[in-house]
Amino acid sequence: MSSYRIDELSVDQLDRISLPKFQRGFVWTKKKQEDFVQTLHDGYPFGTLLVYPENDNDKDAKLQLLDGQQRLSTIKKYRQDPLQFWKPLNRESYTSVYQSVKKMLPEGDPMSI
């Protein structure tokens, strides 16, 4: 089993994680998402993303998300549109979180911010 810090994960690693059909839909409120982004910035522990490989013999296999769907979805939403979190974060917080997420993106990635 491997563990990673969230700021060490790349876009490719995050995109390998898929939601199984048994997962519930996204239910976090905007406030809950904002609080979670602030938690990332502050460096507080936030729980795990529990994943299981679809194929144990393929290191690049898709990973099934067993726990952490709300957290992962919020991270992906932030990656896609960081400005939606501008108001609840002070400028210093926003810049720090922005830099952490930017580190996850490979150079030249079309999703780069």
Image: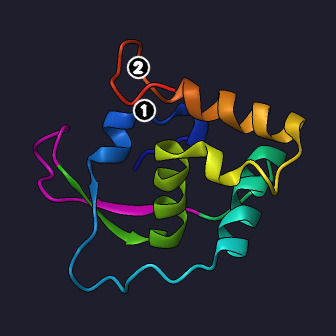
- Name which of mark 1 and mark 2 comes first in the sequence: 1
> Residue 53: where, in percent of width, then height?
22, 56
Q: Identify the secondary structure beneath mark 1.
A: loop
> Residue 42: where, in percent of width, then height?
84, 47
> Residue 44: where, in percent of width, then height?
80, 54
Q: Are marks 1 and 2 in contact (CB under 8 Å)?
A: yes
Residue 39 counted in the magenta span: no
Q: Amino acid at mark 1?
A: Ser
Q: Residue at x 32, y 82 (%)?
A: 23
> Residue 19: where, in percent of width, then height?
28, 69
Camera sees residue 3: no
Residue that numbered label 2 is attached to: 106
Q: Nearer the viewer, residue 101 or 58?
A: 101
Q: Which residues are magenta?
A: 48-61
Q: Residue at x 38, y 30 (%)?
A: 111
* Alpha carbon distance from label 1 to label 2: 7 Å
Up-down relation of residue 28 to residue 17 (above or below): below
Q: Which residue is at the far top?
A: 107
Q: Residue at x 35, y 39 (%)?
A: 13
Up-down relation of residue 19 to residue 107 (above or below): below
Q: How is the image coloured?
A: rainbow
Residue that numbered label 1 is attached to: 10
Q: Taking 78 as reference, is 98 left or right?
A: right
Camera sees residue 37: yes
